[in-house]
Image (cartoon, helix red, strand yellow):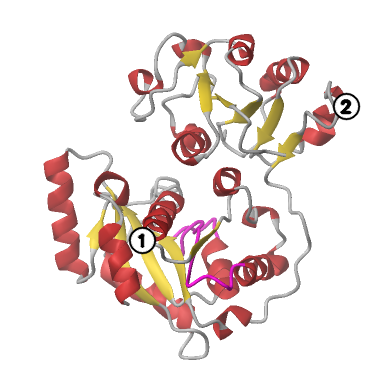
Amino acid sequence: MLEKHHKLAVYMEGNLDSDYGKMGDGVMRYSPNPVVCVVDSTQAGKRVCDASDLPHTFPVVGTLDEARGMGADVLVLGLAPSGGRVPEEWLPHLRRALHLGMSLINGLHDRLNDQLGSEIRAPGEQWIWDVRQPAFTPDIATGRGGTLDNRRVLMVGTDMAIGKMTAGLEIHRWLQQQAVSSAFVATGQIGITVTGHGIPLDAFKVDHACGAVESAVMDAAGHDVIIIEGQGSLLHPGSSATLSLMRGSCANRLVMCHRAGMTHLRKPDHVRIPPLRPFIRLNEEMAHVCGSLTPAKTVGVALNTSRLPEAEALEAITRLEDETGLPVEDVVRFGAEKLGRALMDS
């Protein structure tokens, strides 16, 4: 599968600067593999940072042949269309990538191995990684994480796509820089792709989801800190993921993730986001369940201020610290030290 020497091209056709590009951004930001280019024929000839709000300087090319010519071994599907399915119009391009000798990384729900596996030209050298396919059937969770004597930090949030994975990876990276024994448990396709391991939580049956999380946490039991990538939100009517993560991890620390100025969910936008202080308390109470399960303390708030000028971002951070009484930081913009130290002091 993916090894450190493999060079990546990120497929972002027509959506380099859209909400559908979260997978591509995560790979460009965090993958240890070299990214040689991004594929988007509508932005060819530019750099990523010239064609979008993303900070990356990777060149944008218009064709897969160009990407292959630049040395790309692997094509990463960097887009997540609505519904998480591979659009029919992508298939000729993916066949072309295989014909050119490239491997594929697919974070969508469809199994490309079933559709395109027979078209692999060099078995043993080429492969298709369907990231969102469970690799095992876990046992039912039993709360084993609560027996561990370490910090198990669950990233929770006020909405989906709010920055839980990004904040978790930034804190994990800061901890490692301080020589803290830290592990990151990836629970979604982006985290799995950039770390090389983890569980695709939304691909497990409901009865098995908690057990999958518990298994991943117990695999990391030897670390002093385990950062568990969050999914969904207790607020979202379409998501039960936060509860599975709480039960499976027996988290004893929480980091709340929020976007500055956001008052309602993105979709459905009629759902109001409550004041953060009682919502933080709700997450803690859901983890503890009236004293029956592991108590979890919120150590800080990761605030996404990417849509604000720097001065307004700093003001938003100060206001939220006054409101919640907790350390608040935009860990991408200003670094993870504040939240990292709060975690280690907790």
- The x and y percentages for residue 127 are 77, 32
Q: Position of residue 315 (x, y in %)?
A: 12, 51
Q: Residue furthest front?
A: 179
Q: Please tell me whether residue 59 is drawn above or below residue 244 in the rendered image.
A: above
Question: Percent position (x, y) of residue 318?
Answer: 14, 58
Q: Quadrant of residue 202?
A: bottom right
Q: Residues within 10 Å of mark 2 (few under 14, many from 20)?
A: few
Q: Quadrant of the C terminus?
A: bottom left
Residue 79's disc is none
Under mark 2, the amino acid is Ser
Magenta stretch, main secondary structure, is loop
Q: Residue at x 45, y 77 (%)?
A: 252
Q: Is residue 150 left or right of residue 121?
A: left
What segment carries the magenta color? 220-239
Q: Dividing the picture into quarters, in which one does residue 140 lie?
A: bottom right
Of label 2 and label 1, which has the lower sequence position? 2
- Which residue is the site of mark 1? 178
Q: Is residue 224 magenta?
A: yes
**What kind of residue is marked 1?**
Gln
Q: Nearer the viewer, residue 225 or 210?
A: 225
Residue underneath mark 2: 118
Compared with 77, 200 (above or below) is: below
Whole-number angstrom distance, CA of label 2 to CA of label 1:
47 Å
